Image (cartoon, helix red, strand yellow):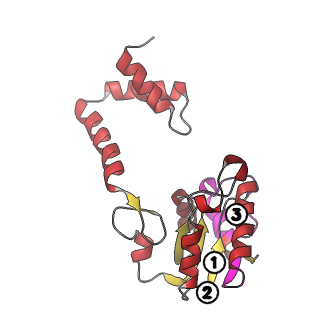
Amino acid sequence: MFPEPVENLITELARLPGIGRRSAQRIAFFLLRRSREDAEALARSIVAVKDEITFCRQCFNFTDEELCIFCRDARRDTSLICVVEEPSDIIPIEKGGEYRGLYHVLGGALSPLDGVDPEHLRIGELVSRVEDGEVTEVIVATNPNTSGESTAMYLADLLREKVMITRLASGLPVGADLEYADEATVSRAMQGRREL
């Protein structure tokens, strides 16, 4: 229906999460109306993200340095680790304003049916951080769905003898992703966390 370069752009844009074919067409047409400089700036930004962004050596959040902004911040409480599934899950916790500890990004949640077992996640690295001795509490902030709950229970069983394990309190809707929760809900959940 469209010239090949436009069709290729629409196809690639439609692969993005939350972008269907119609949205991809609108974005493609928007880009066609923009200047070449605007298009090149967008392309450079995409390439720069792929070239310059990596995972934090300690917590596995996204960073452009060896350690992420949270692990570098000397004002944060190093005795607390909040475990999340993905780097995007850190954002609502930070917006809540209640948490001042460090993070640990697992890189997903346990899902044996999908082939995601403990060795596919950064669980070993979390255990190493806990065994280093400074951590007194691990807050499990996995999503309140089946995979997130399974992961939380697995971590609680694994770490219970080593450190206090807590889970975010209710307030987060069951079956929803932490990434989409509002700040007030996350703040209440952080304040009312409970031991597993």
- The percent coordinates of residue 146 (x first, y second) are 76, 55
Residue 21: percent from the left, percent from the top? 53, 25
Secondary structure beneath label 2? loop
Which residue is located at x 70 percent, y 63 percent?
Answer: 151
- First reached walking from the N terminus: tag 1 or tag 3: 1
Does the magenta segment cover residue 161?
yes
Instruction: Give the residue number, with chain letter if any, for mark 3.
Output: 151
Q: Earlier in the sequence, mark 3 or mark 2?
A: 2
Quote the CA–CA distance across marks 1 and 3: 13 Å
Amino acid type, residue under disc 2 in the picture: Thr
Q: Residues within 10 Å of mark 3 (few under 14, many from 20)?
A: many
Q: Secondary structure at mark 1?
A: strand
Q: Which mark is residue 138?
A: 1
> Residue 47 placed where, x, y %?
32, 44
Quadrant location of the C terminus? bottom right
- In this figure, which residue is indicated by the disc labeled 2? 136
Quarter of the image for residue 108 reads bottom right
Q: Magenta part of the protein: which range?
A: 160-189
Foreground disc of the pair 3, 2: 3
- Whether residue 193 is visible here, answered yes or no, is no
Q: Nearer the viewer, mark 1 or mark 3?
A: 3
Q: Is residue 52 left or right of residue 124?
A: left
Q: Amino acid at mark 3?
A: Thr
| Cα gap from disc 3 to disc 2, whole angstroms | 20 Å
Direction from residue 187 to residue 38 in the image, left or right = left
Q: Amino acid at mark 1?
A: Val
